[in-house]
Amino acid sequence: MSKRKVEIYKIIRDKWQYLLEEPARELIHDIAKEACRQALELATENAKLRHNFYRKDEDYEQYCEYAGTYPERHDKYGEPYGVDVFDVNRQSILDIINQVE
């Protein structure tokens, strides 16, 4: 996991000089948007990918559920024999909130 953090107070400090020039509502909006951008950037760096493989002959229900949506594996005759399912672990993204100060 990245040790980088989203530092809201630093963002506020960096934008503070504009407080006299902009309405406060726009400034707060810009600060929130920047904090969200940084948090999403961290989330993409730290997201954990999960992989499952469902064989057509062993896990037919799961195979049918995902075939056509996810990459299928084919034998040397071109017949599909399984499907690779990839998804992002949601908790790995939600844990990014702990890196927001």
Image (cartoon, helix red, strand yellow):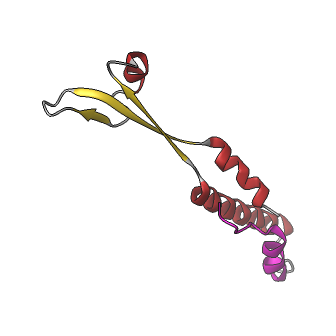
Image quadrant holding the C terminus, namely bottom right
Question: Measured from the top left, where is residue 84 in percent x and y?
Answer: 38, 35
The answer to whether 13 appears left or right of 79 in the picture is right
Question: Measured from the top left, where is residue 59 in percent x and y?
Answer: 40, 19
Image quadrant holding the N terminus, namely bottom right
Please say whether residue 68 is visible from this viewpoint.
no
Query: Measuring 14% from the left and 34% from the top, which residue is drawn there?
Result: 76
The number of numbered badges drawn on the structure is 0
Which contiguous range is marked in magenta? 1-17
Query: Measuring 72% from the left and 50% from the top, which residue is drawn there?
Result: 95
Above or below for 38 versus 17: above
The answer to whether 63 appears left or right of 100 in the picture is left
Question: Measured from the top left, where is residue 63 in percent x and y?
Answer: 38, 23
Q: Nearer the viewer, residue 82 or 94?
A: 82
Above or below for 75 versus 38: above
Single out the residue that lies furthest toward the bottom. 17
Quadrant in which residue 89 is drawn: top right
Single out the residue that lies furthest toward the front. 58
Does 20 appear in magenta? no
Quadrant in which residue 15 is drawn: bottom right
Question: Measured from the top left, where is residue 38 in percent x and y?
Answer: 67, 64
Above or below for 61 versus 101: above
Q: Nearer the viewer, residue 60 or 36?
A: 60
Please say whether residue 40 is visible from this viewpoint.
yes
Query: Measuring 33% from the left and 37% from the top, which residue is drawn there?
Result: 71
Quadrant in which residue 81 is drawn: top left
The answer to whether 91 appears left or right of 71 in the picture is right
